[in-house]
Amino acid sequence: MNSIFTAKRLRWFAAAIVLANGFFPALWILLTSFKTEVELTAKPITYFPHAPTMANYMAAFKDQPLPQYLLNSLIVAFGSMVVTLFISSLAAYAIARLQLPRRNLILTCIIAVSMFPLVTLMVPLFEIMRSLNLLNSYWALIFPYTVLSLPICTLVLVSFFQEIPRDLENAAMIDGCTRLGALWRVVVPLAAPGVFTAGILSFVNAWDEFLLSLSFNSAASFRTLPVGIQMYQGEFAFPWPTISAALVIAMIPVVIVILIFQERVVSGLTTGGIKG
């Protein structure tokens, strides 16, 4: 009995740590966005703003072209998500359904590629983008983000496609569908939780990425949010309240996407597939 009680307490303690690690930084940024510089640097530290102000949000839009950064990030993140889902669906279907030789070796290679540090890929990706004259464009980020998201999205979709009965595809092909038609009309809709999960992973990866965006798009008109937020700091100034306001604004699209597709994403993460 004591061991069961102790195990339950440990689970609650672990859950509290995970919740604090994910929730507290976001809450601190939100509270900081409503403070003044004087209150932020005052001692002792105040956790809640005594006189909340929206001046930091107005400064976030005034000091930098934040709407342009938001638009650039949306275009890049949504574009890479669409391309990633299209390619990873084809790759996952081939691995899950076709009798490919050395299938396990292919999966192992996909896992190995996903573990490469981004820094090791940066120089070759930069050279490719430069040779294609794609630097300082949306495609300079959409293509690399697609490459980076493909391994994990393919693995997610493979696990879902394998759970879908083959009889459904066979029935569709008997009715006149091609194999690709069966994929898009039968398999992908039935694997919707997995598709949404892969899409969210791809979108968030592209939305948060900083290093490639900083290196590939030096033009101000193509800066994404992570790089644009860095522009708020000066040589001798670091306006934390204004930066916090910009960070809160940057989190809003991701929060909206997750809230809209919450049920499907949770279903995808917990079930791991569709049960027939």
Image (tube, helix red, strand yellow):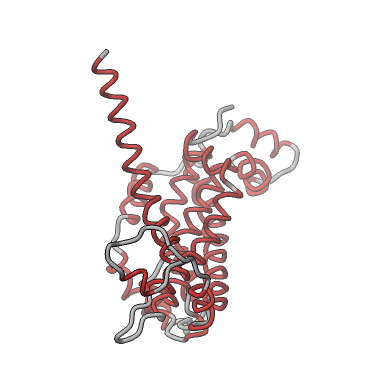
On screen, residue 63 above or below 161: below
Residue 262 percent location from the top left of the image: 56, 45
Is 44 placed left or right of 107 in the picture? left
Which residue is most to the top?
1
Residue 121 percent location from the top left of the image: 32, 68
* Nearest to the observer: residue 261 or residue 103: 261
On screen, residue 175 above or below 23: above
On screen, residue 272 above or below 36: above
**Residue 103: quadrant of the picture:** top left
* Nearest to the observer: residue 263 or residue 57: 57
On screen, residue 257 above or below 239: above
Q: Residue at x 69, y 33 (%)?
A: 171
**How many numbered discs sit on the rendered protein?**
0
* Nearest to the observer: residue 16 or residue 136: 16
Residue 207 percent location from the top left of the image: 47, 64
> Dividing the image into 4 quarters, which one contains the N terminus?
top left
Residue 185 percent location from the top left of the image: 68, 45
Q: Residue at x 64, y 43 (%)?
A: 189
> Dividing the image into 4 quarters, which one contains the C terminus?
top right
Q: Residue at x 39, y 58 (%)?
A: 28
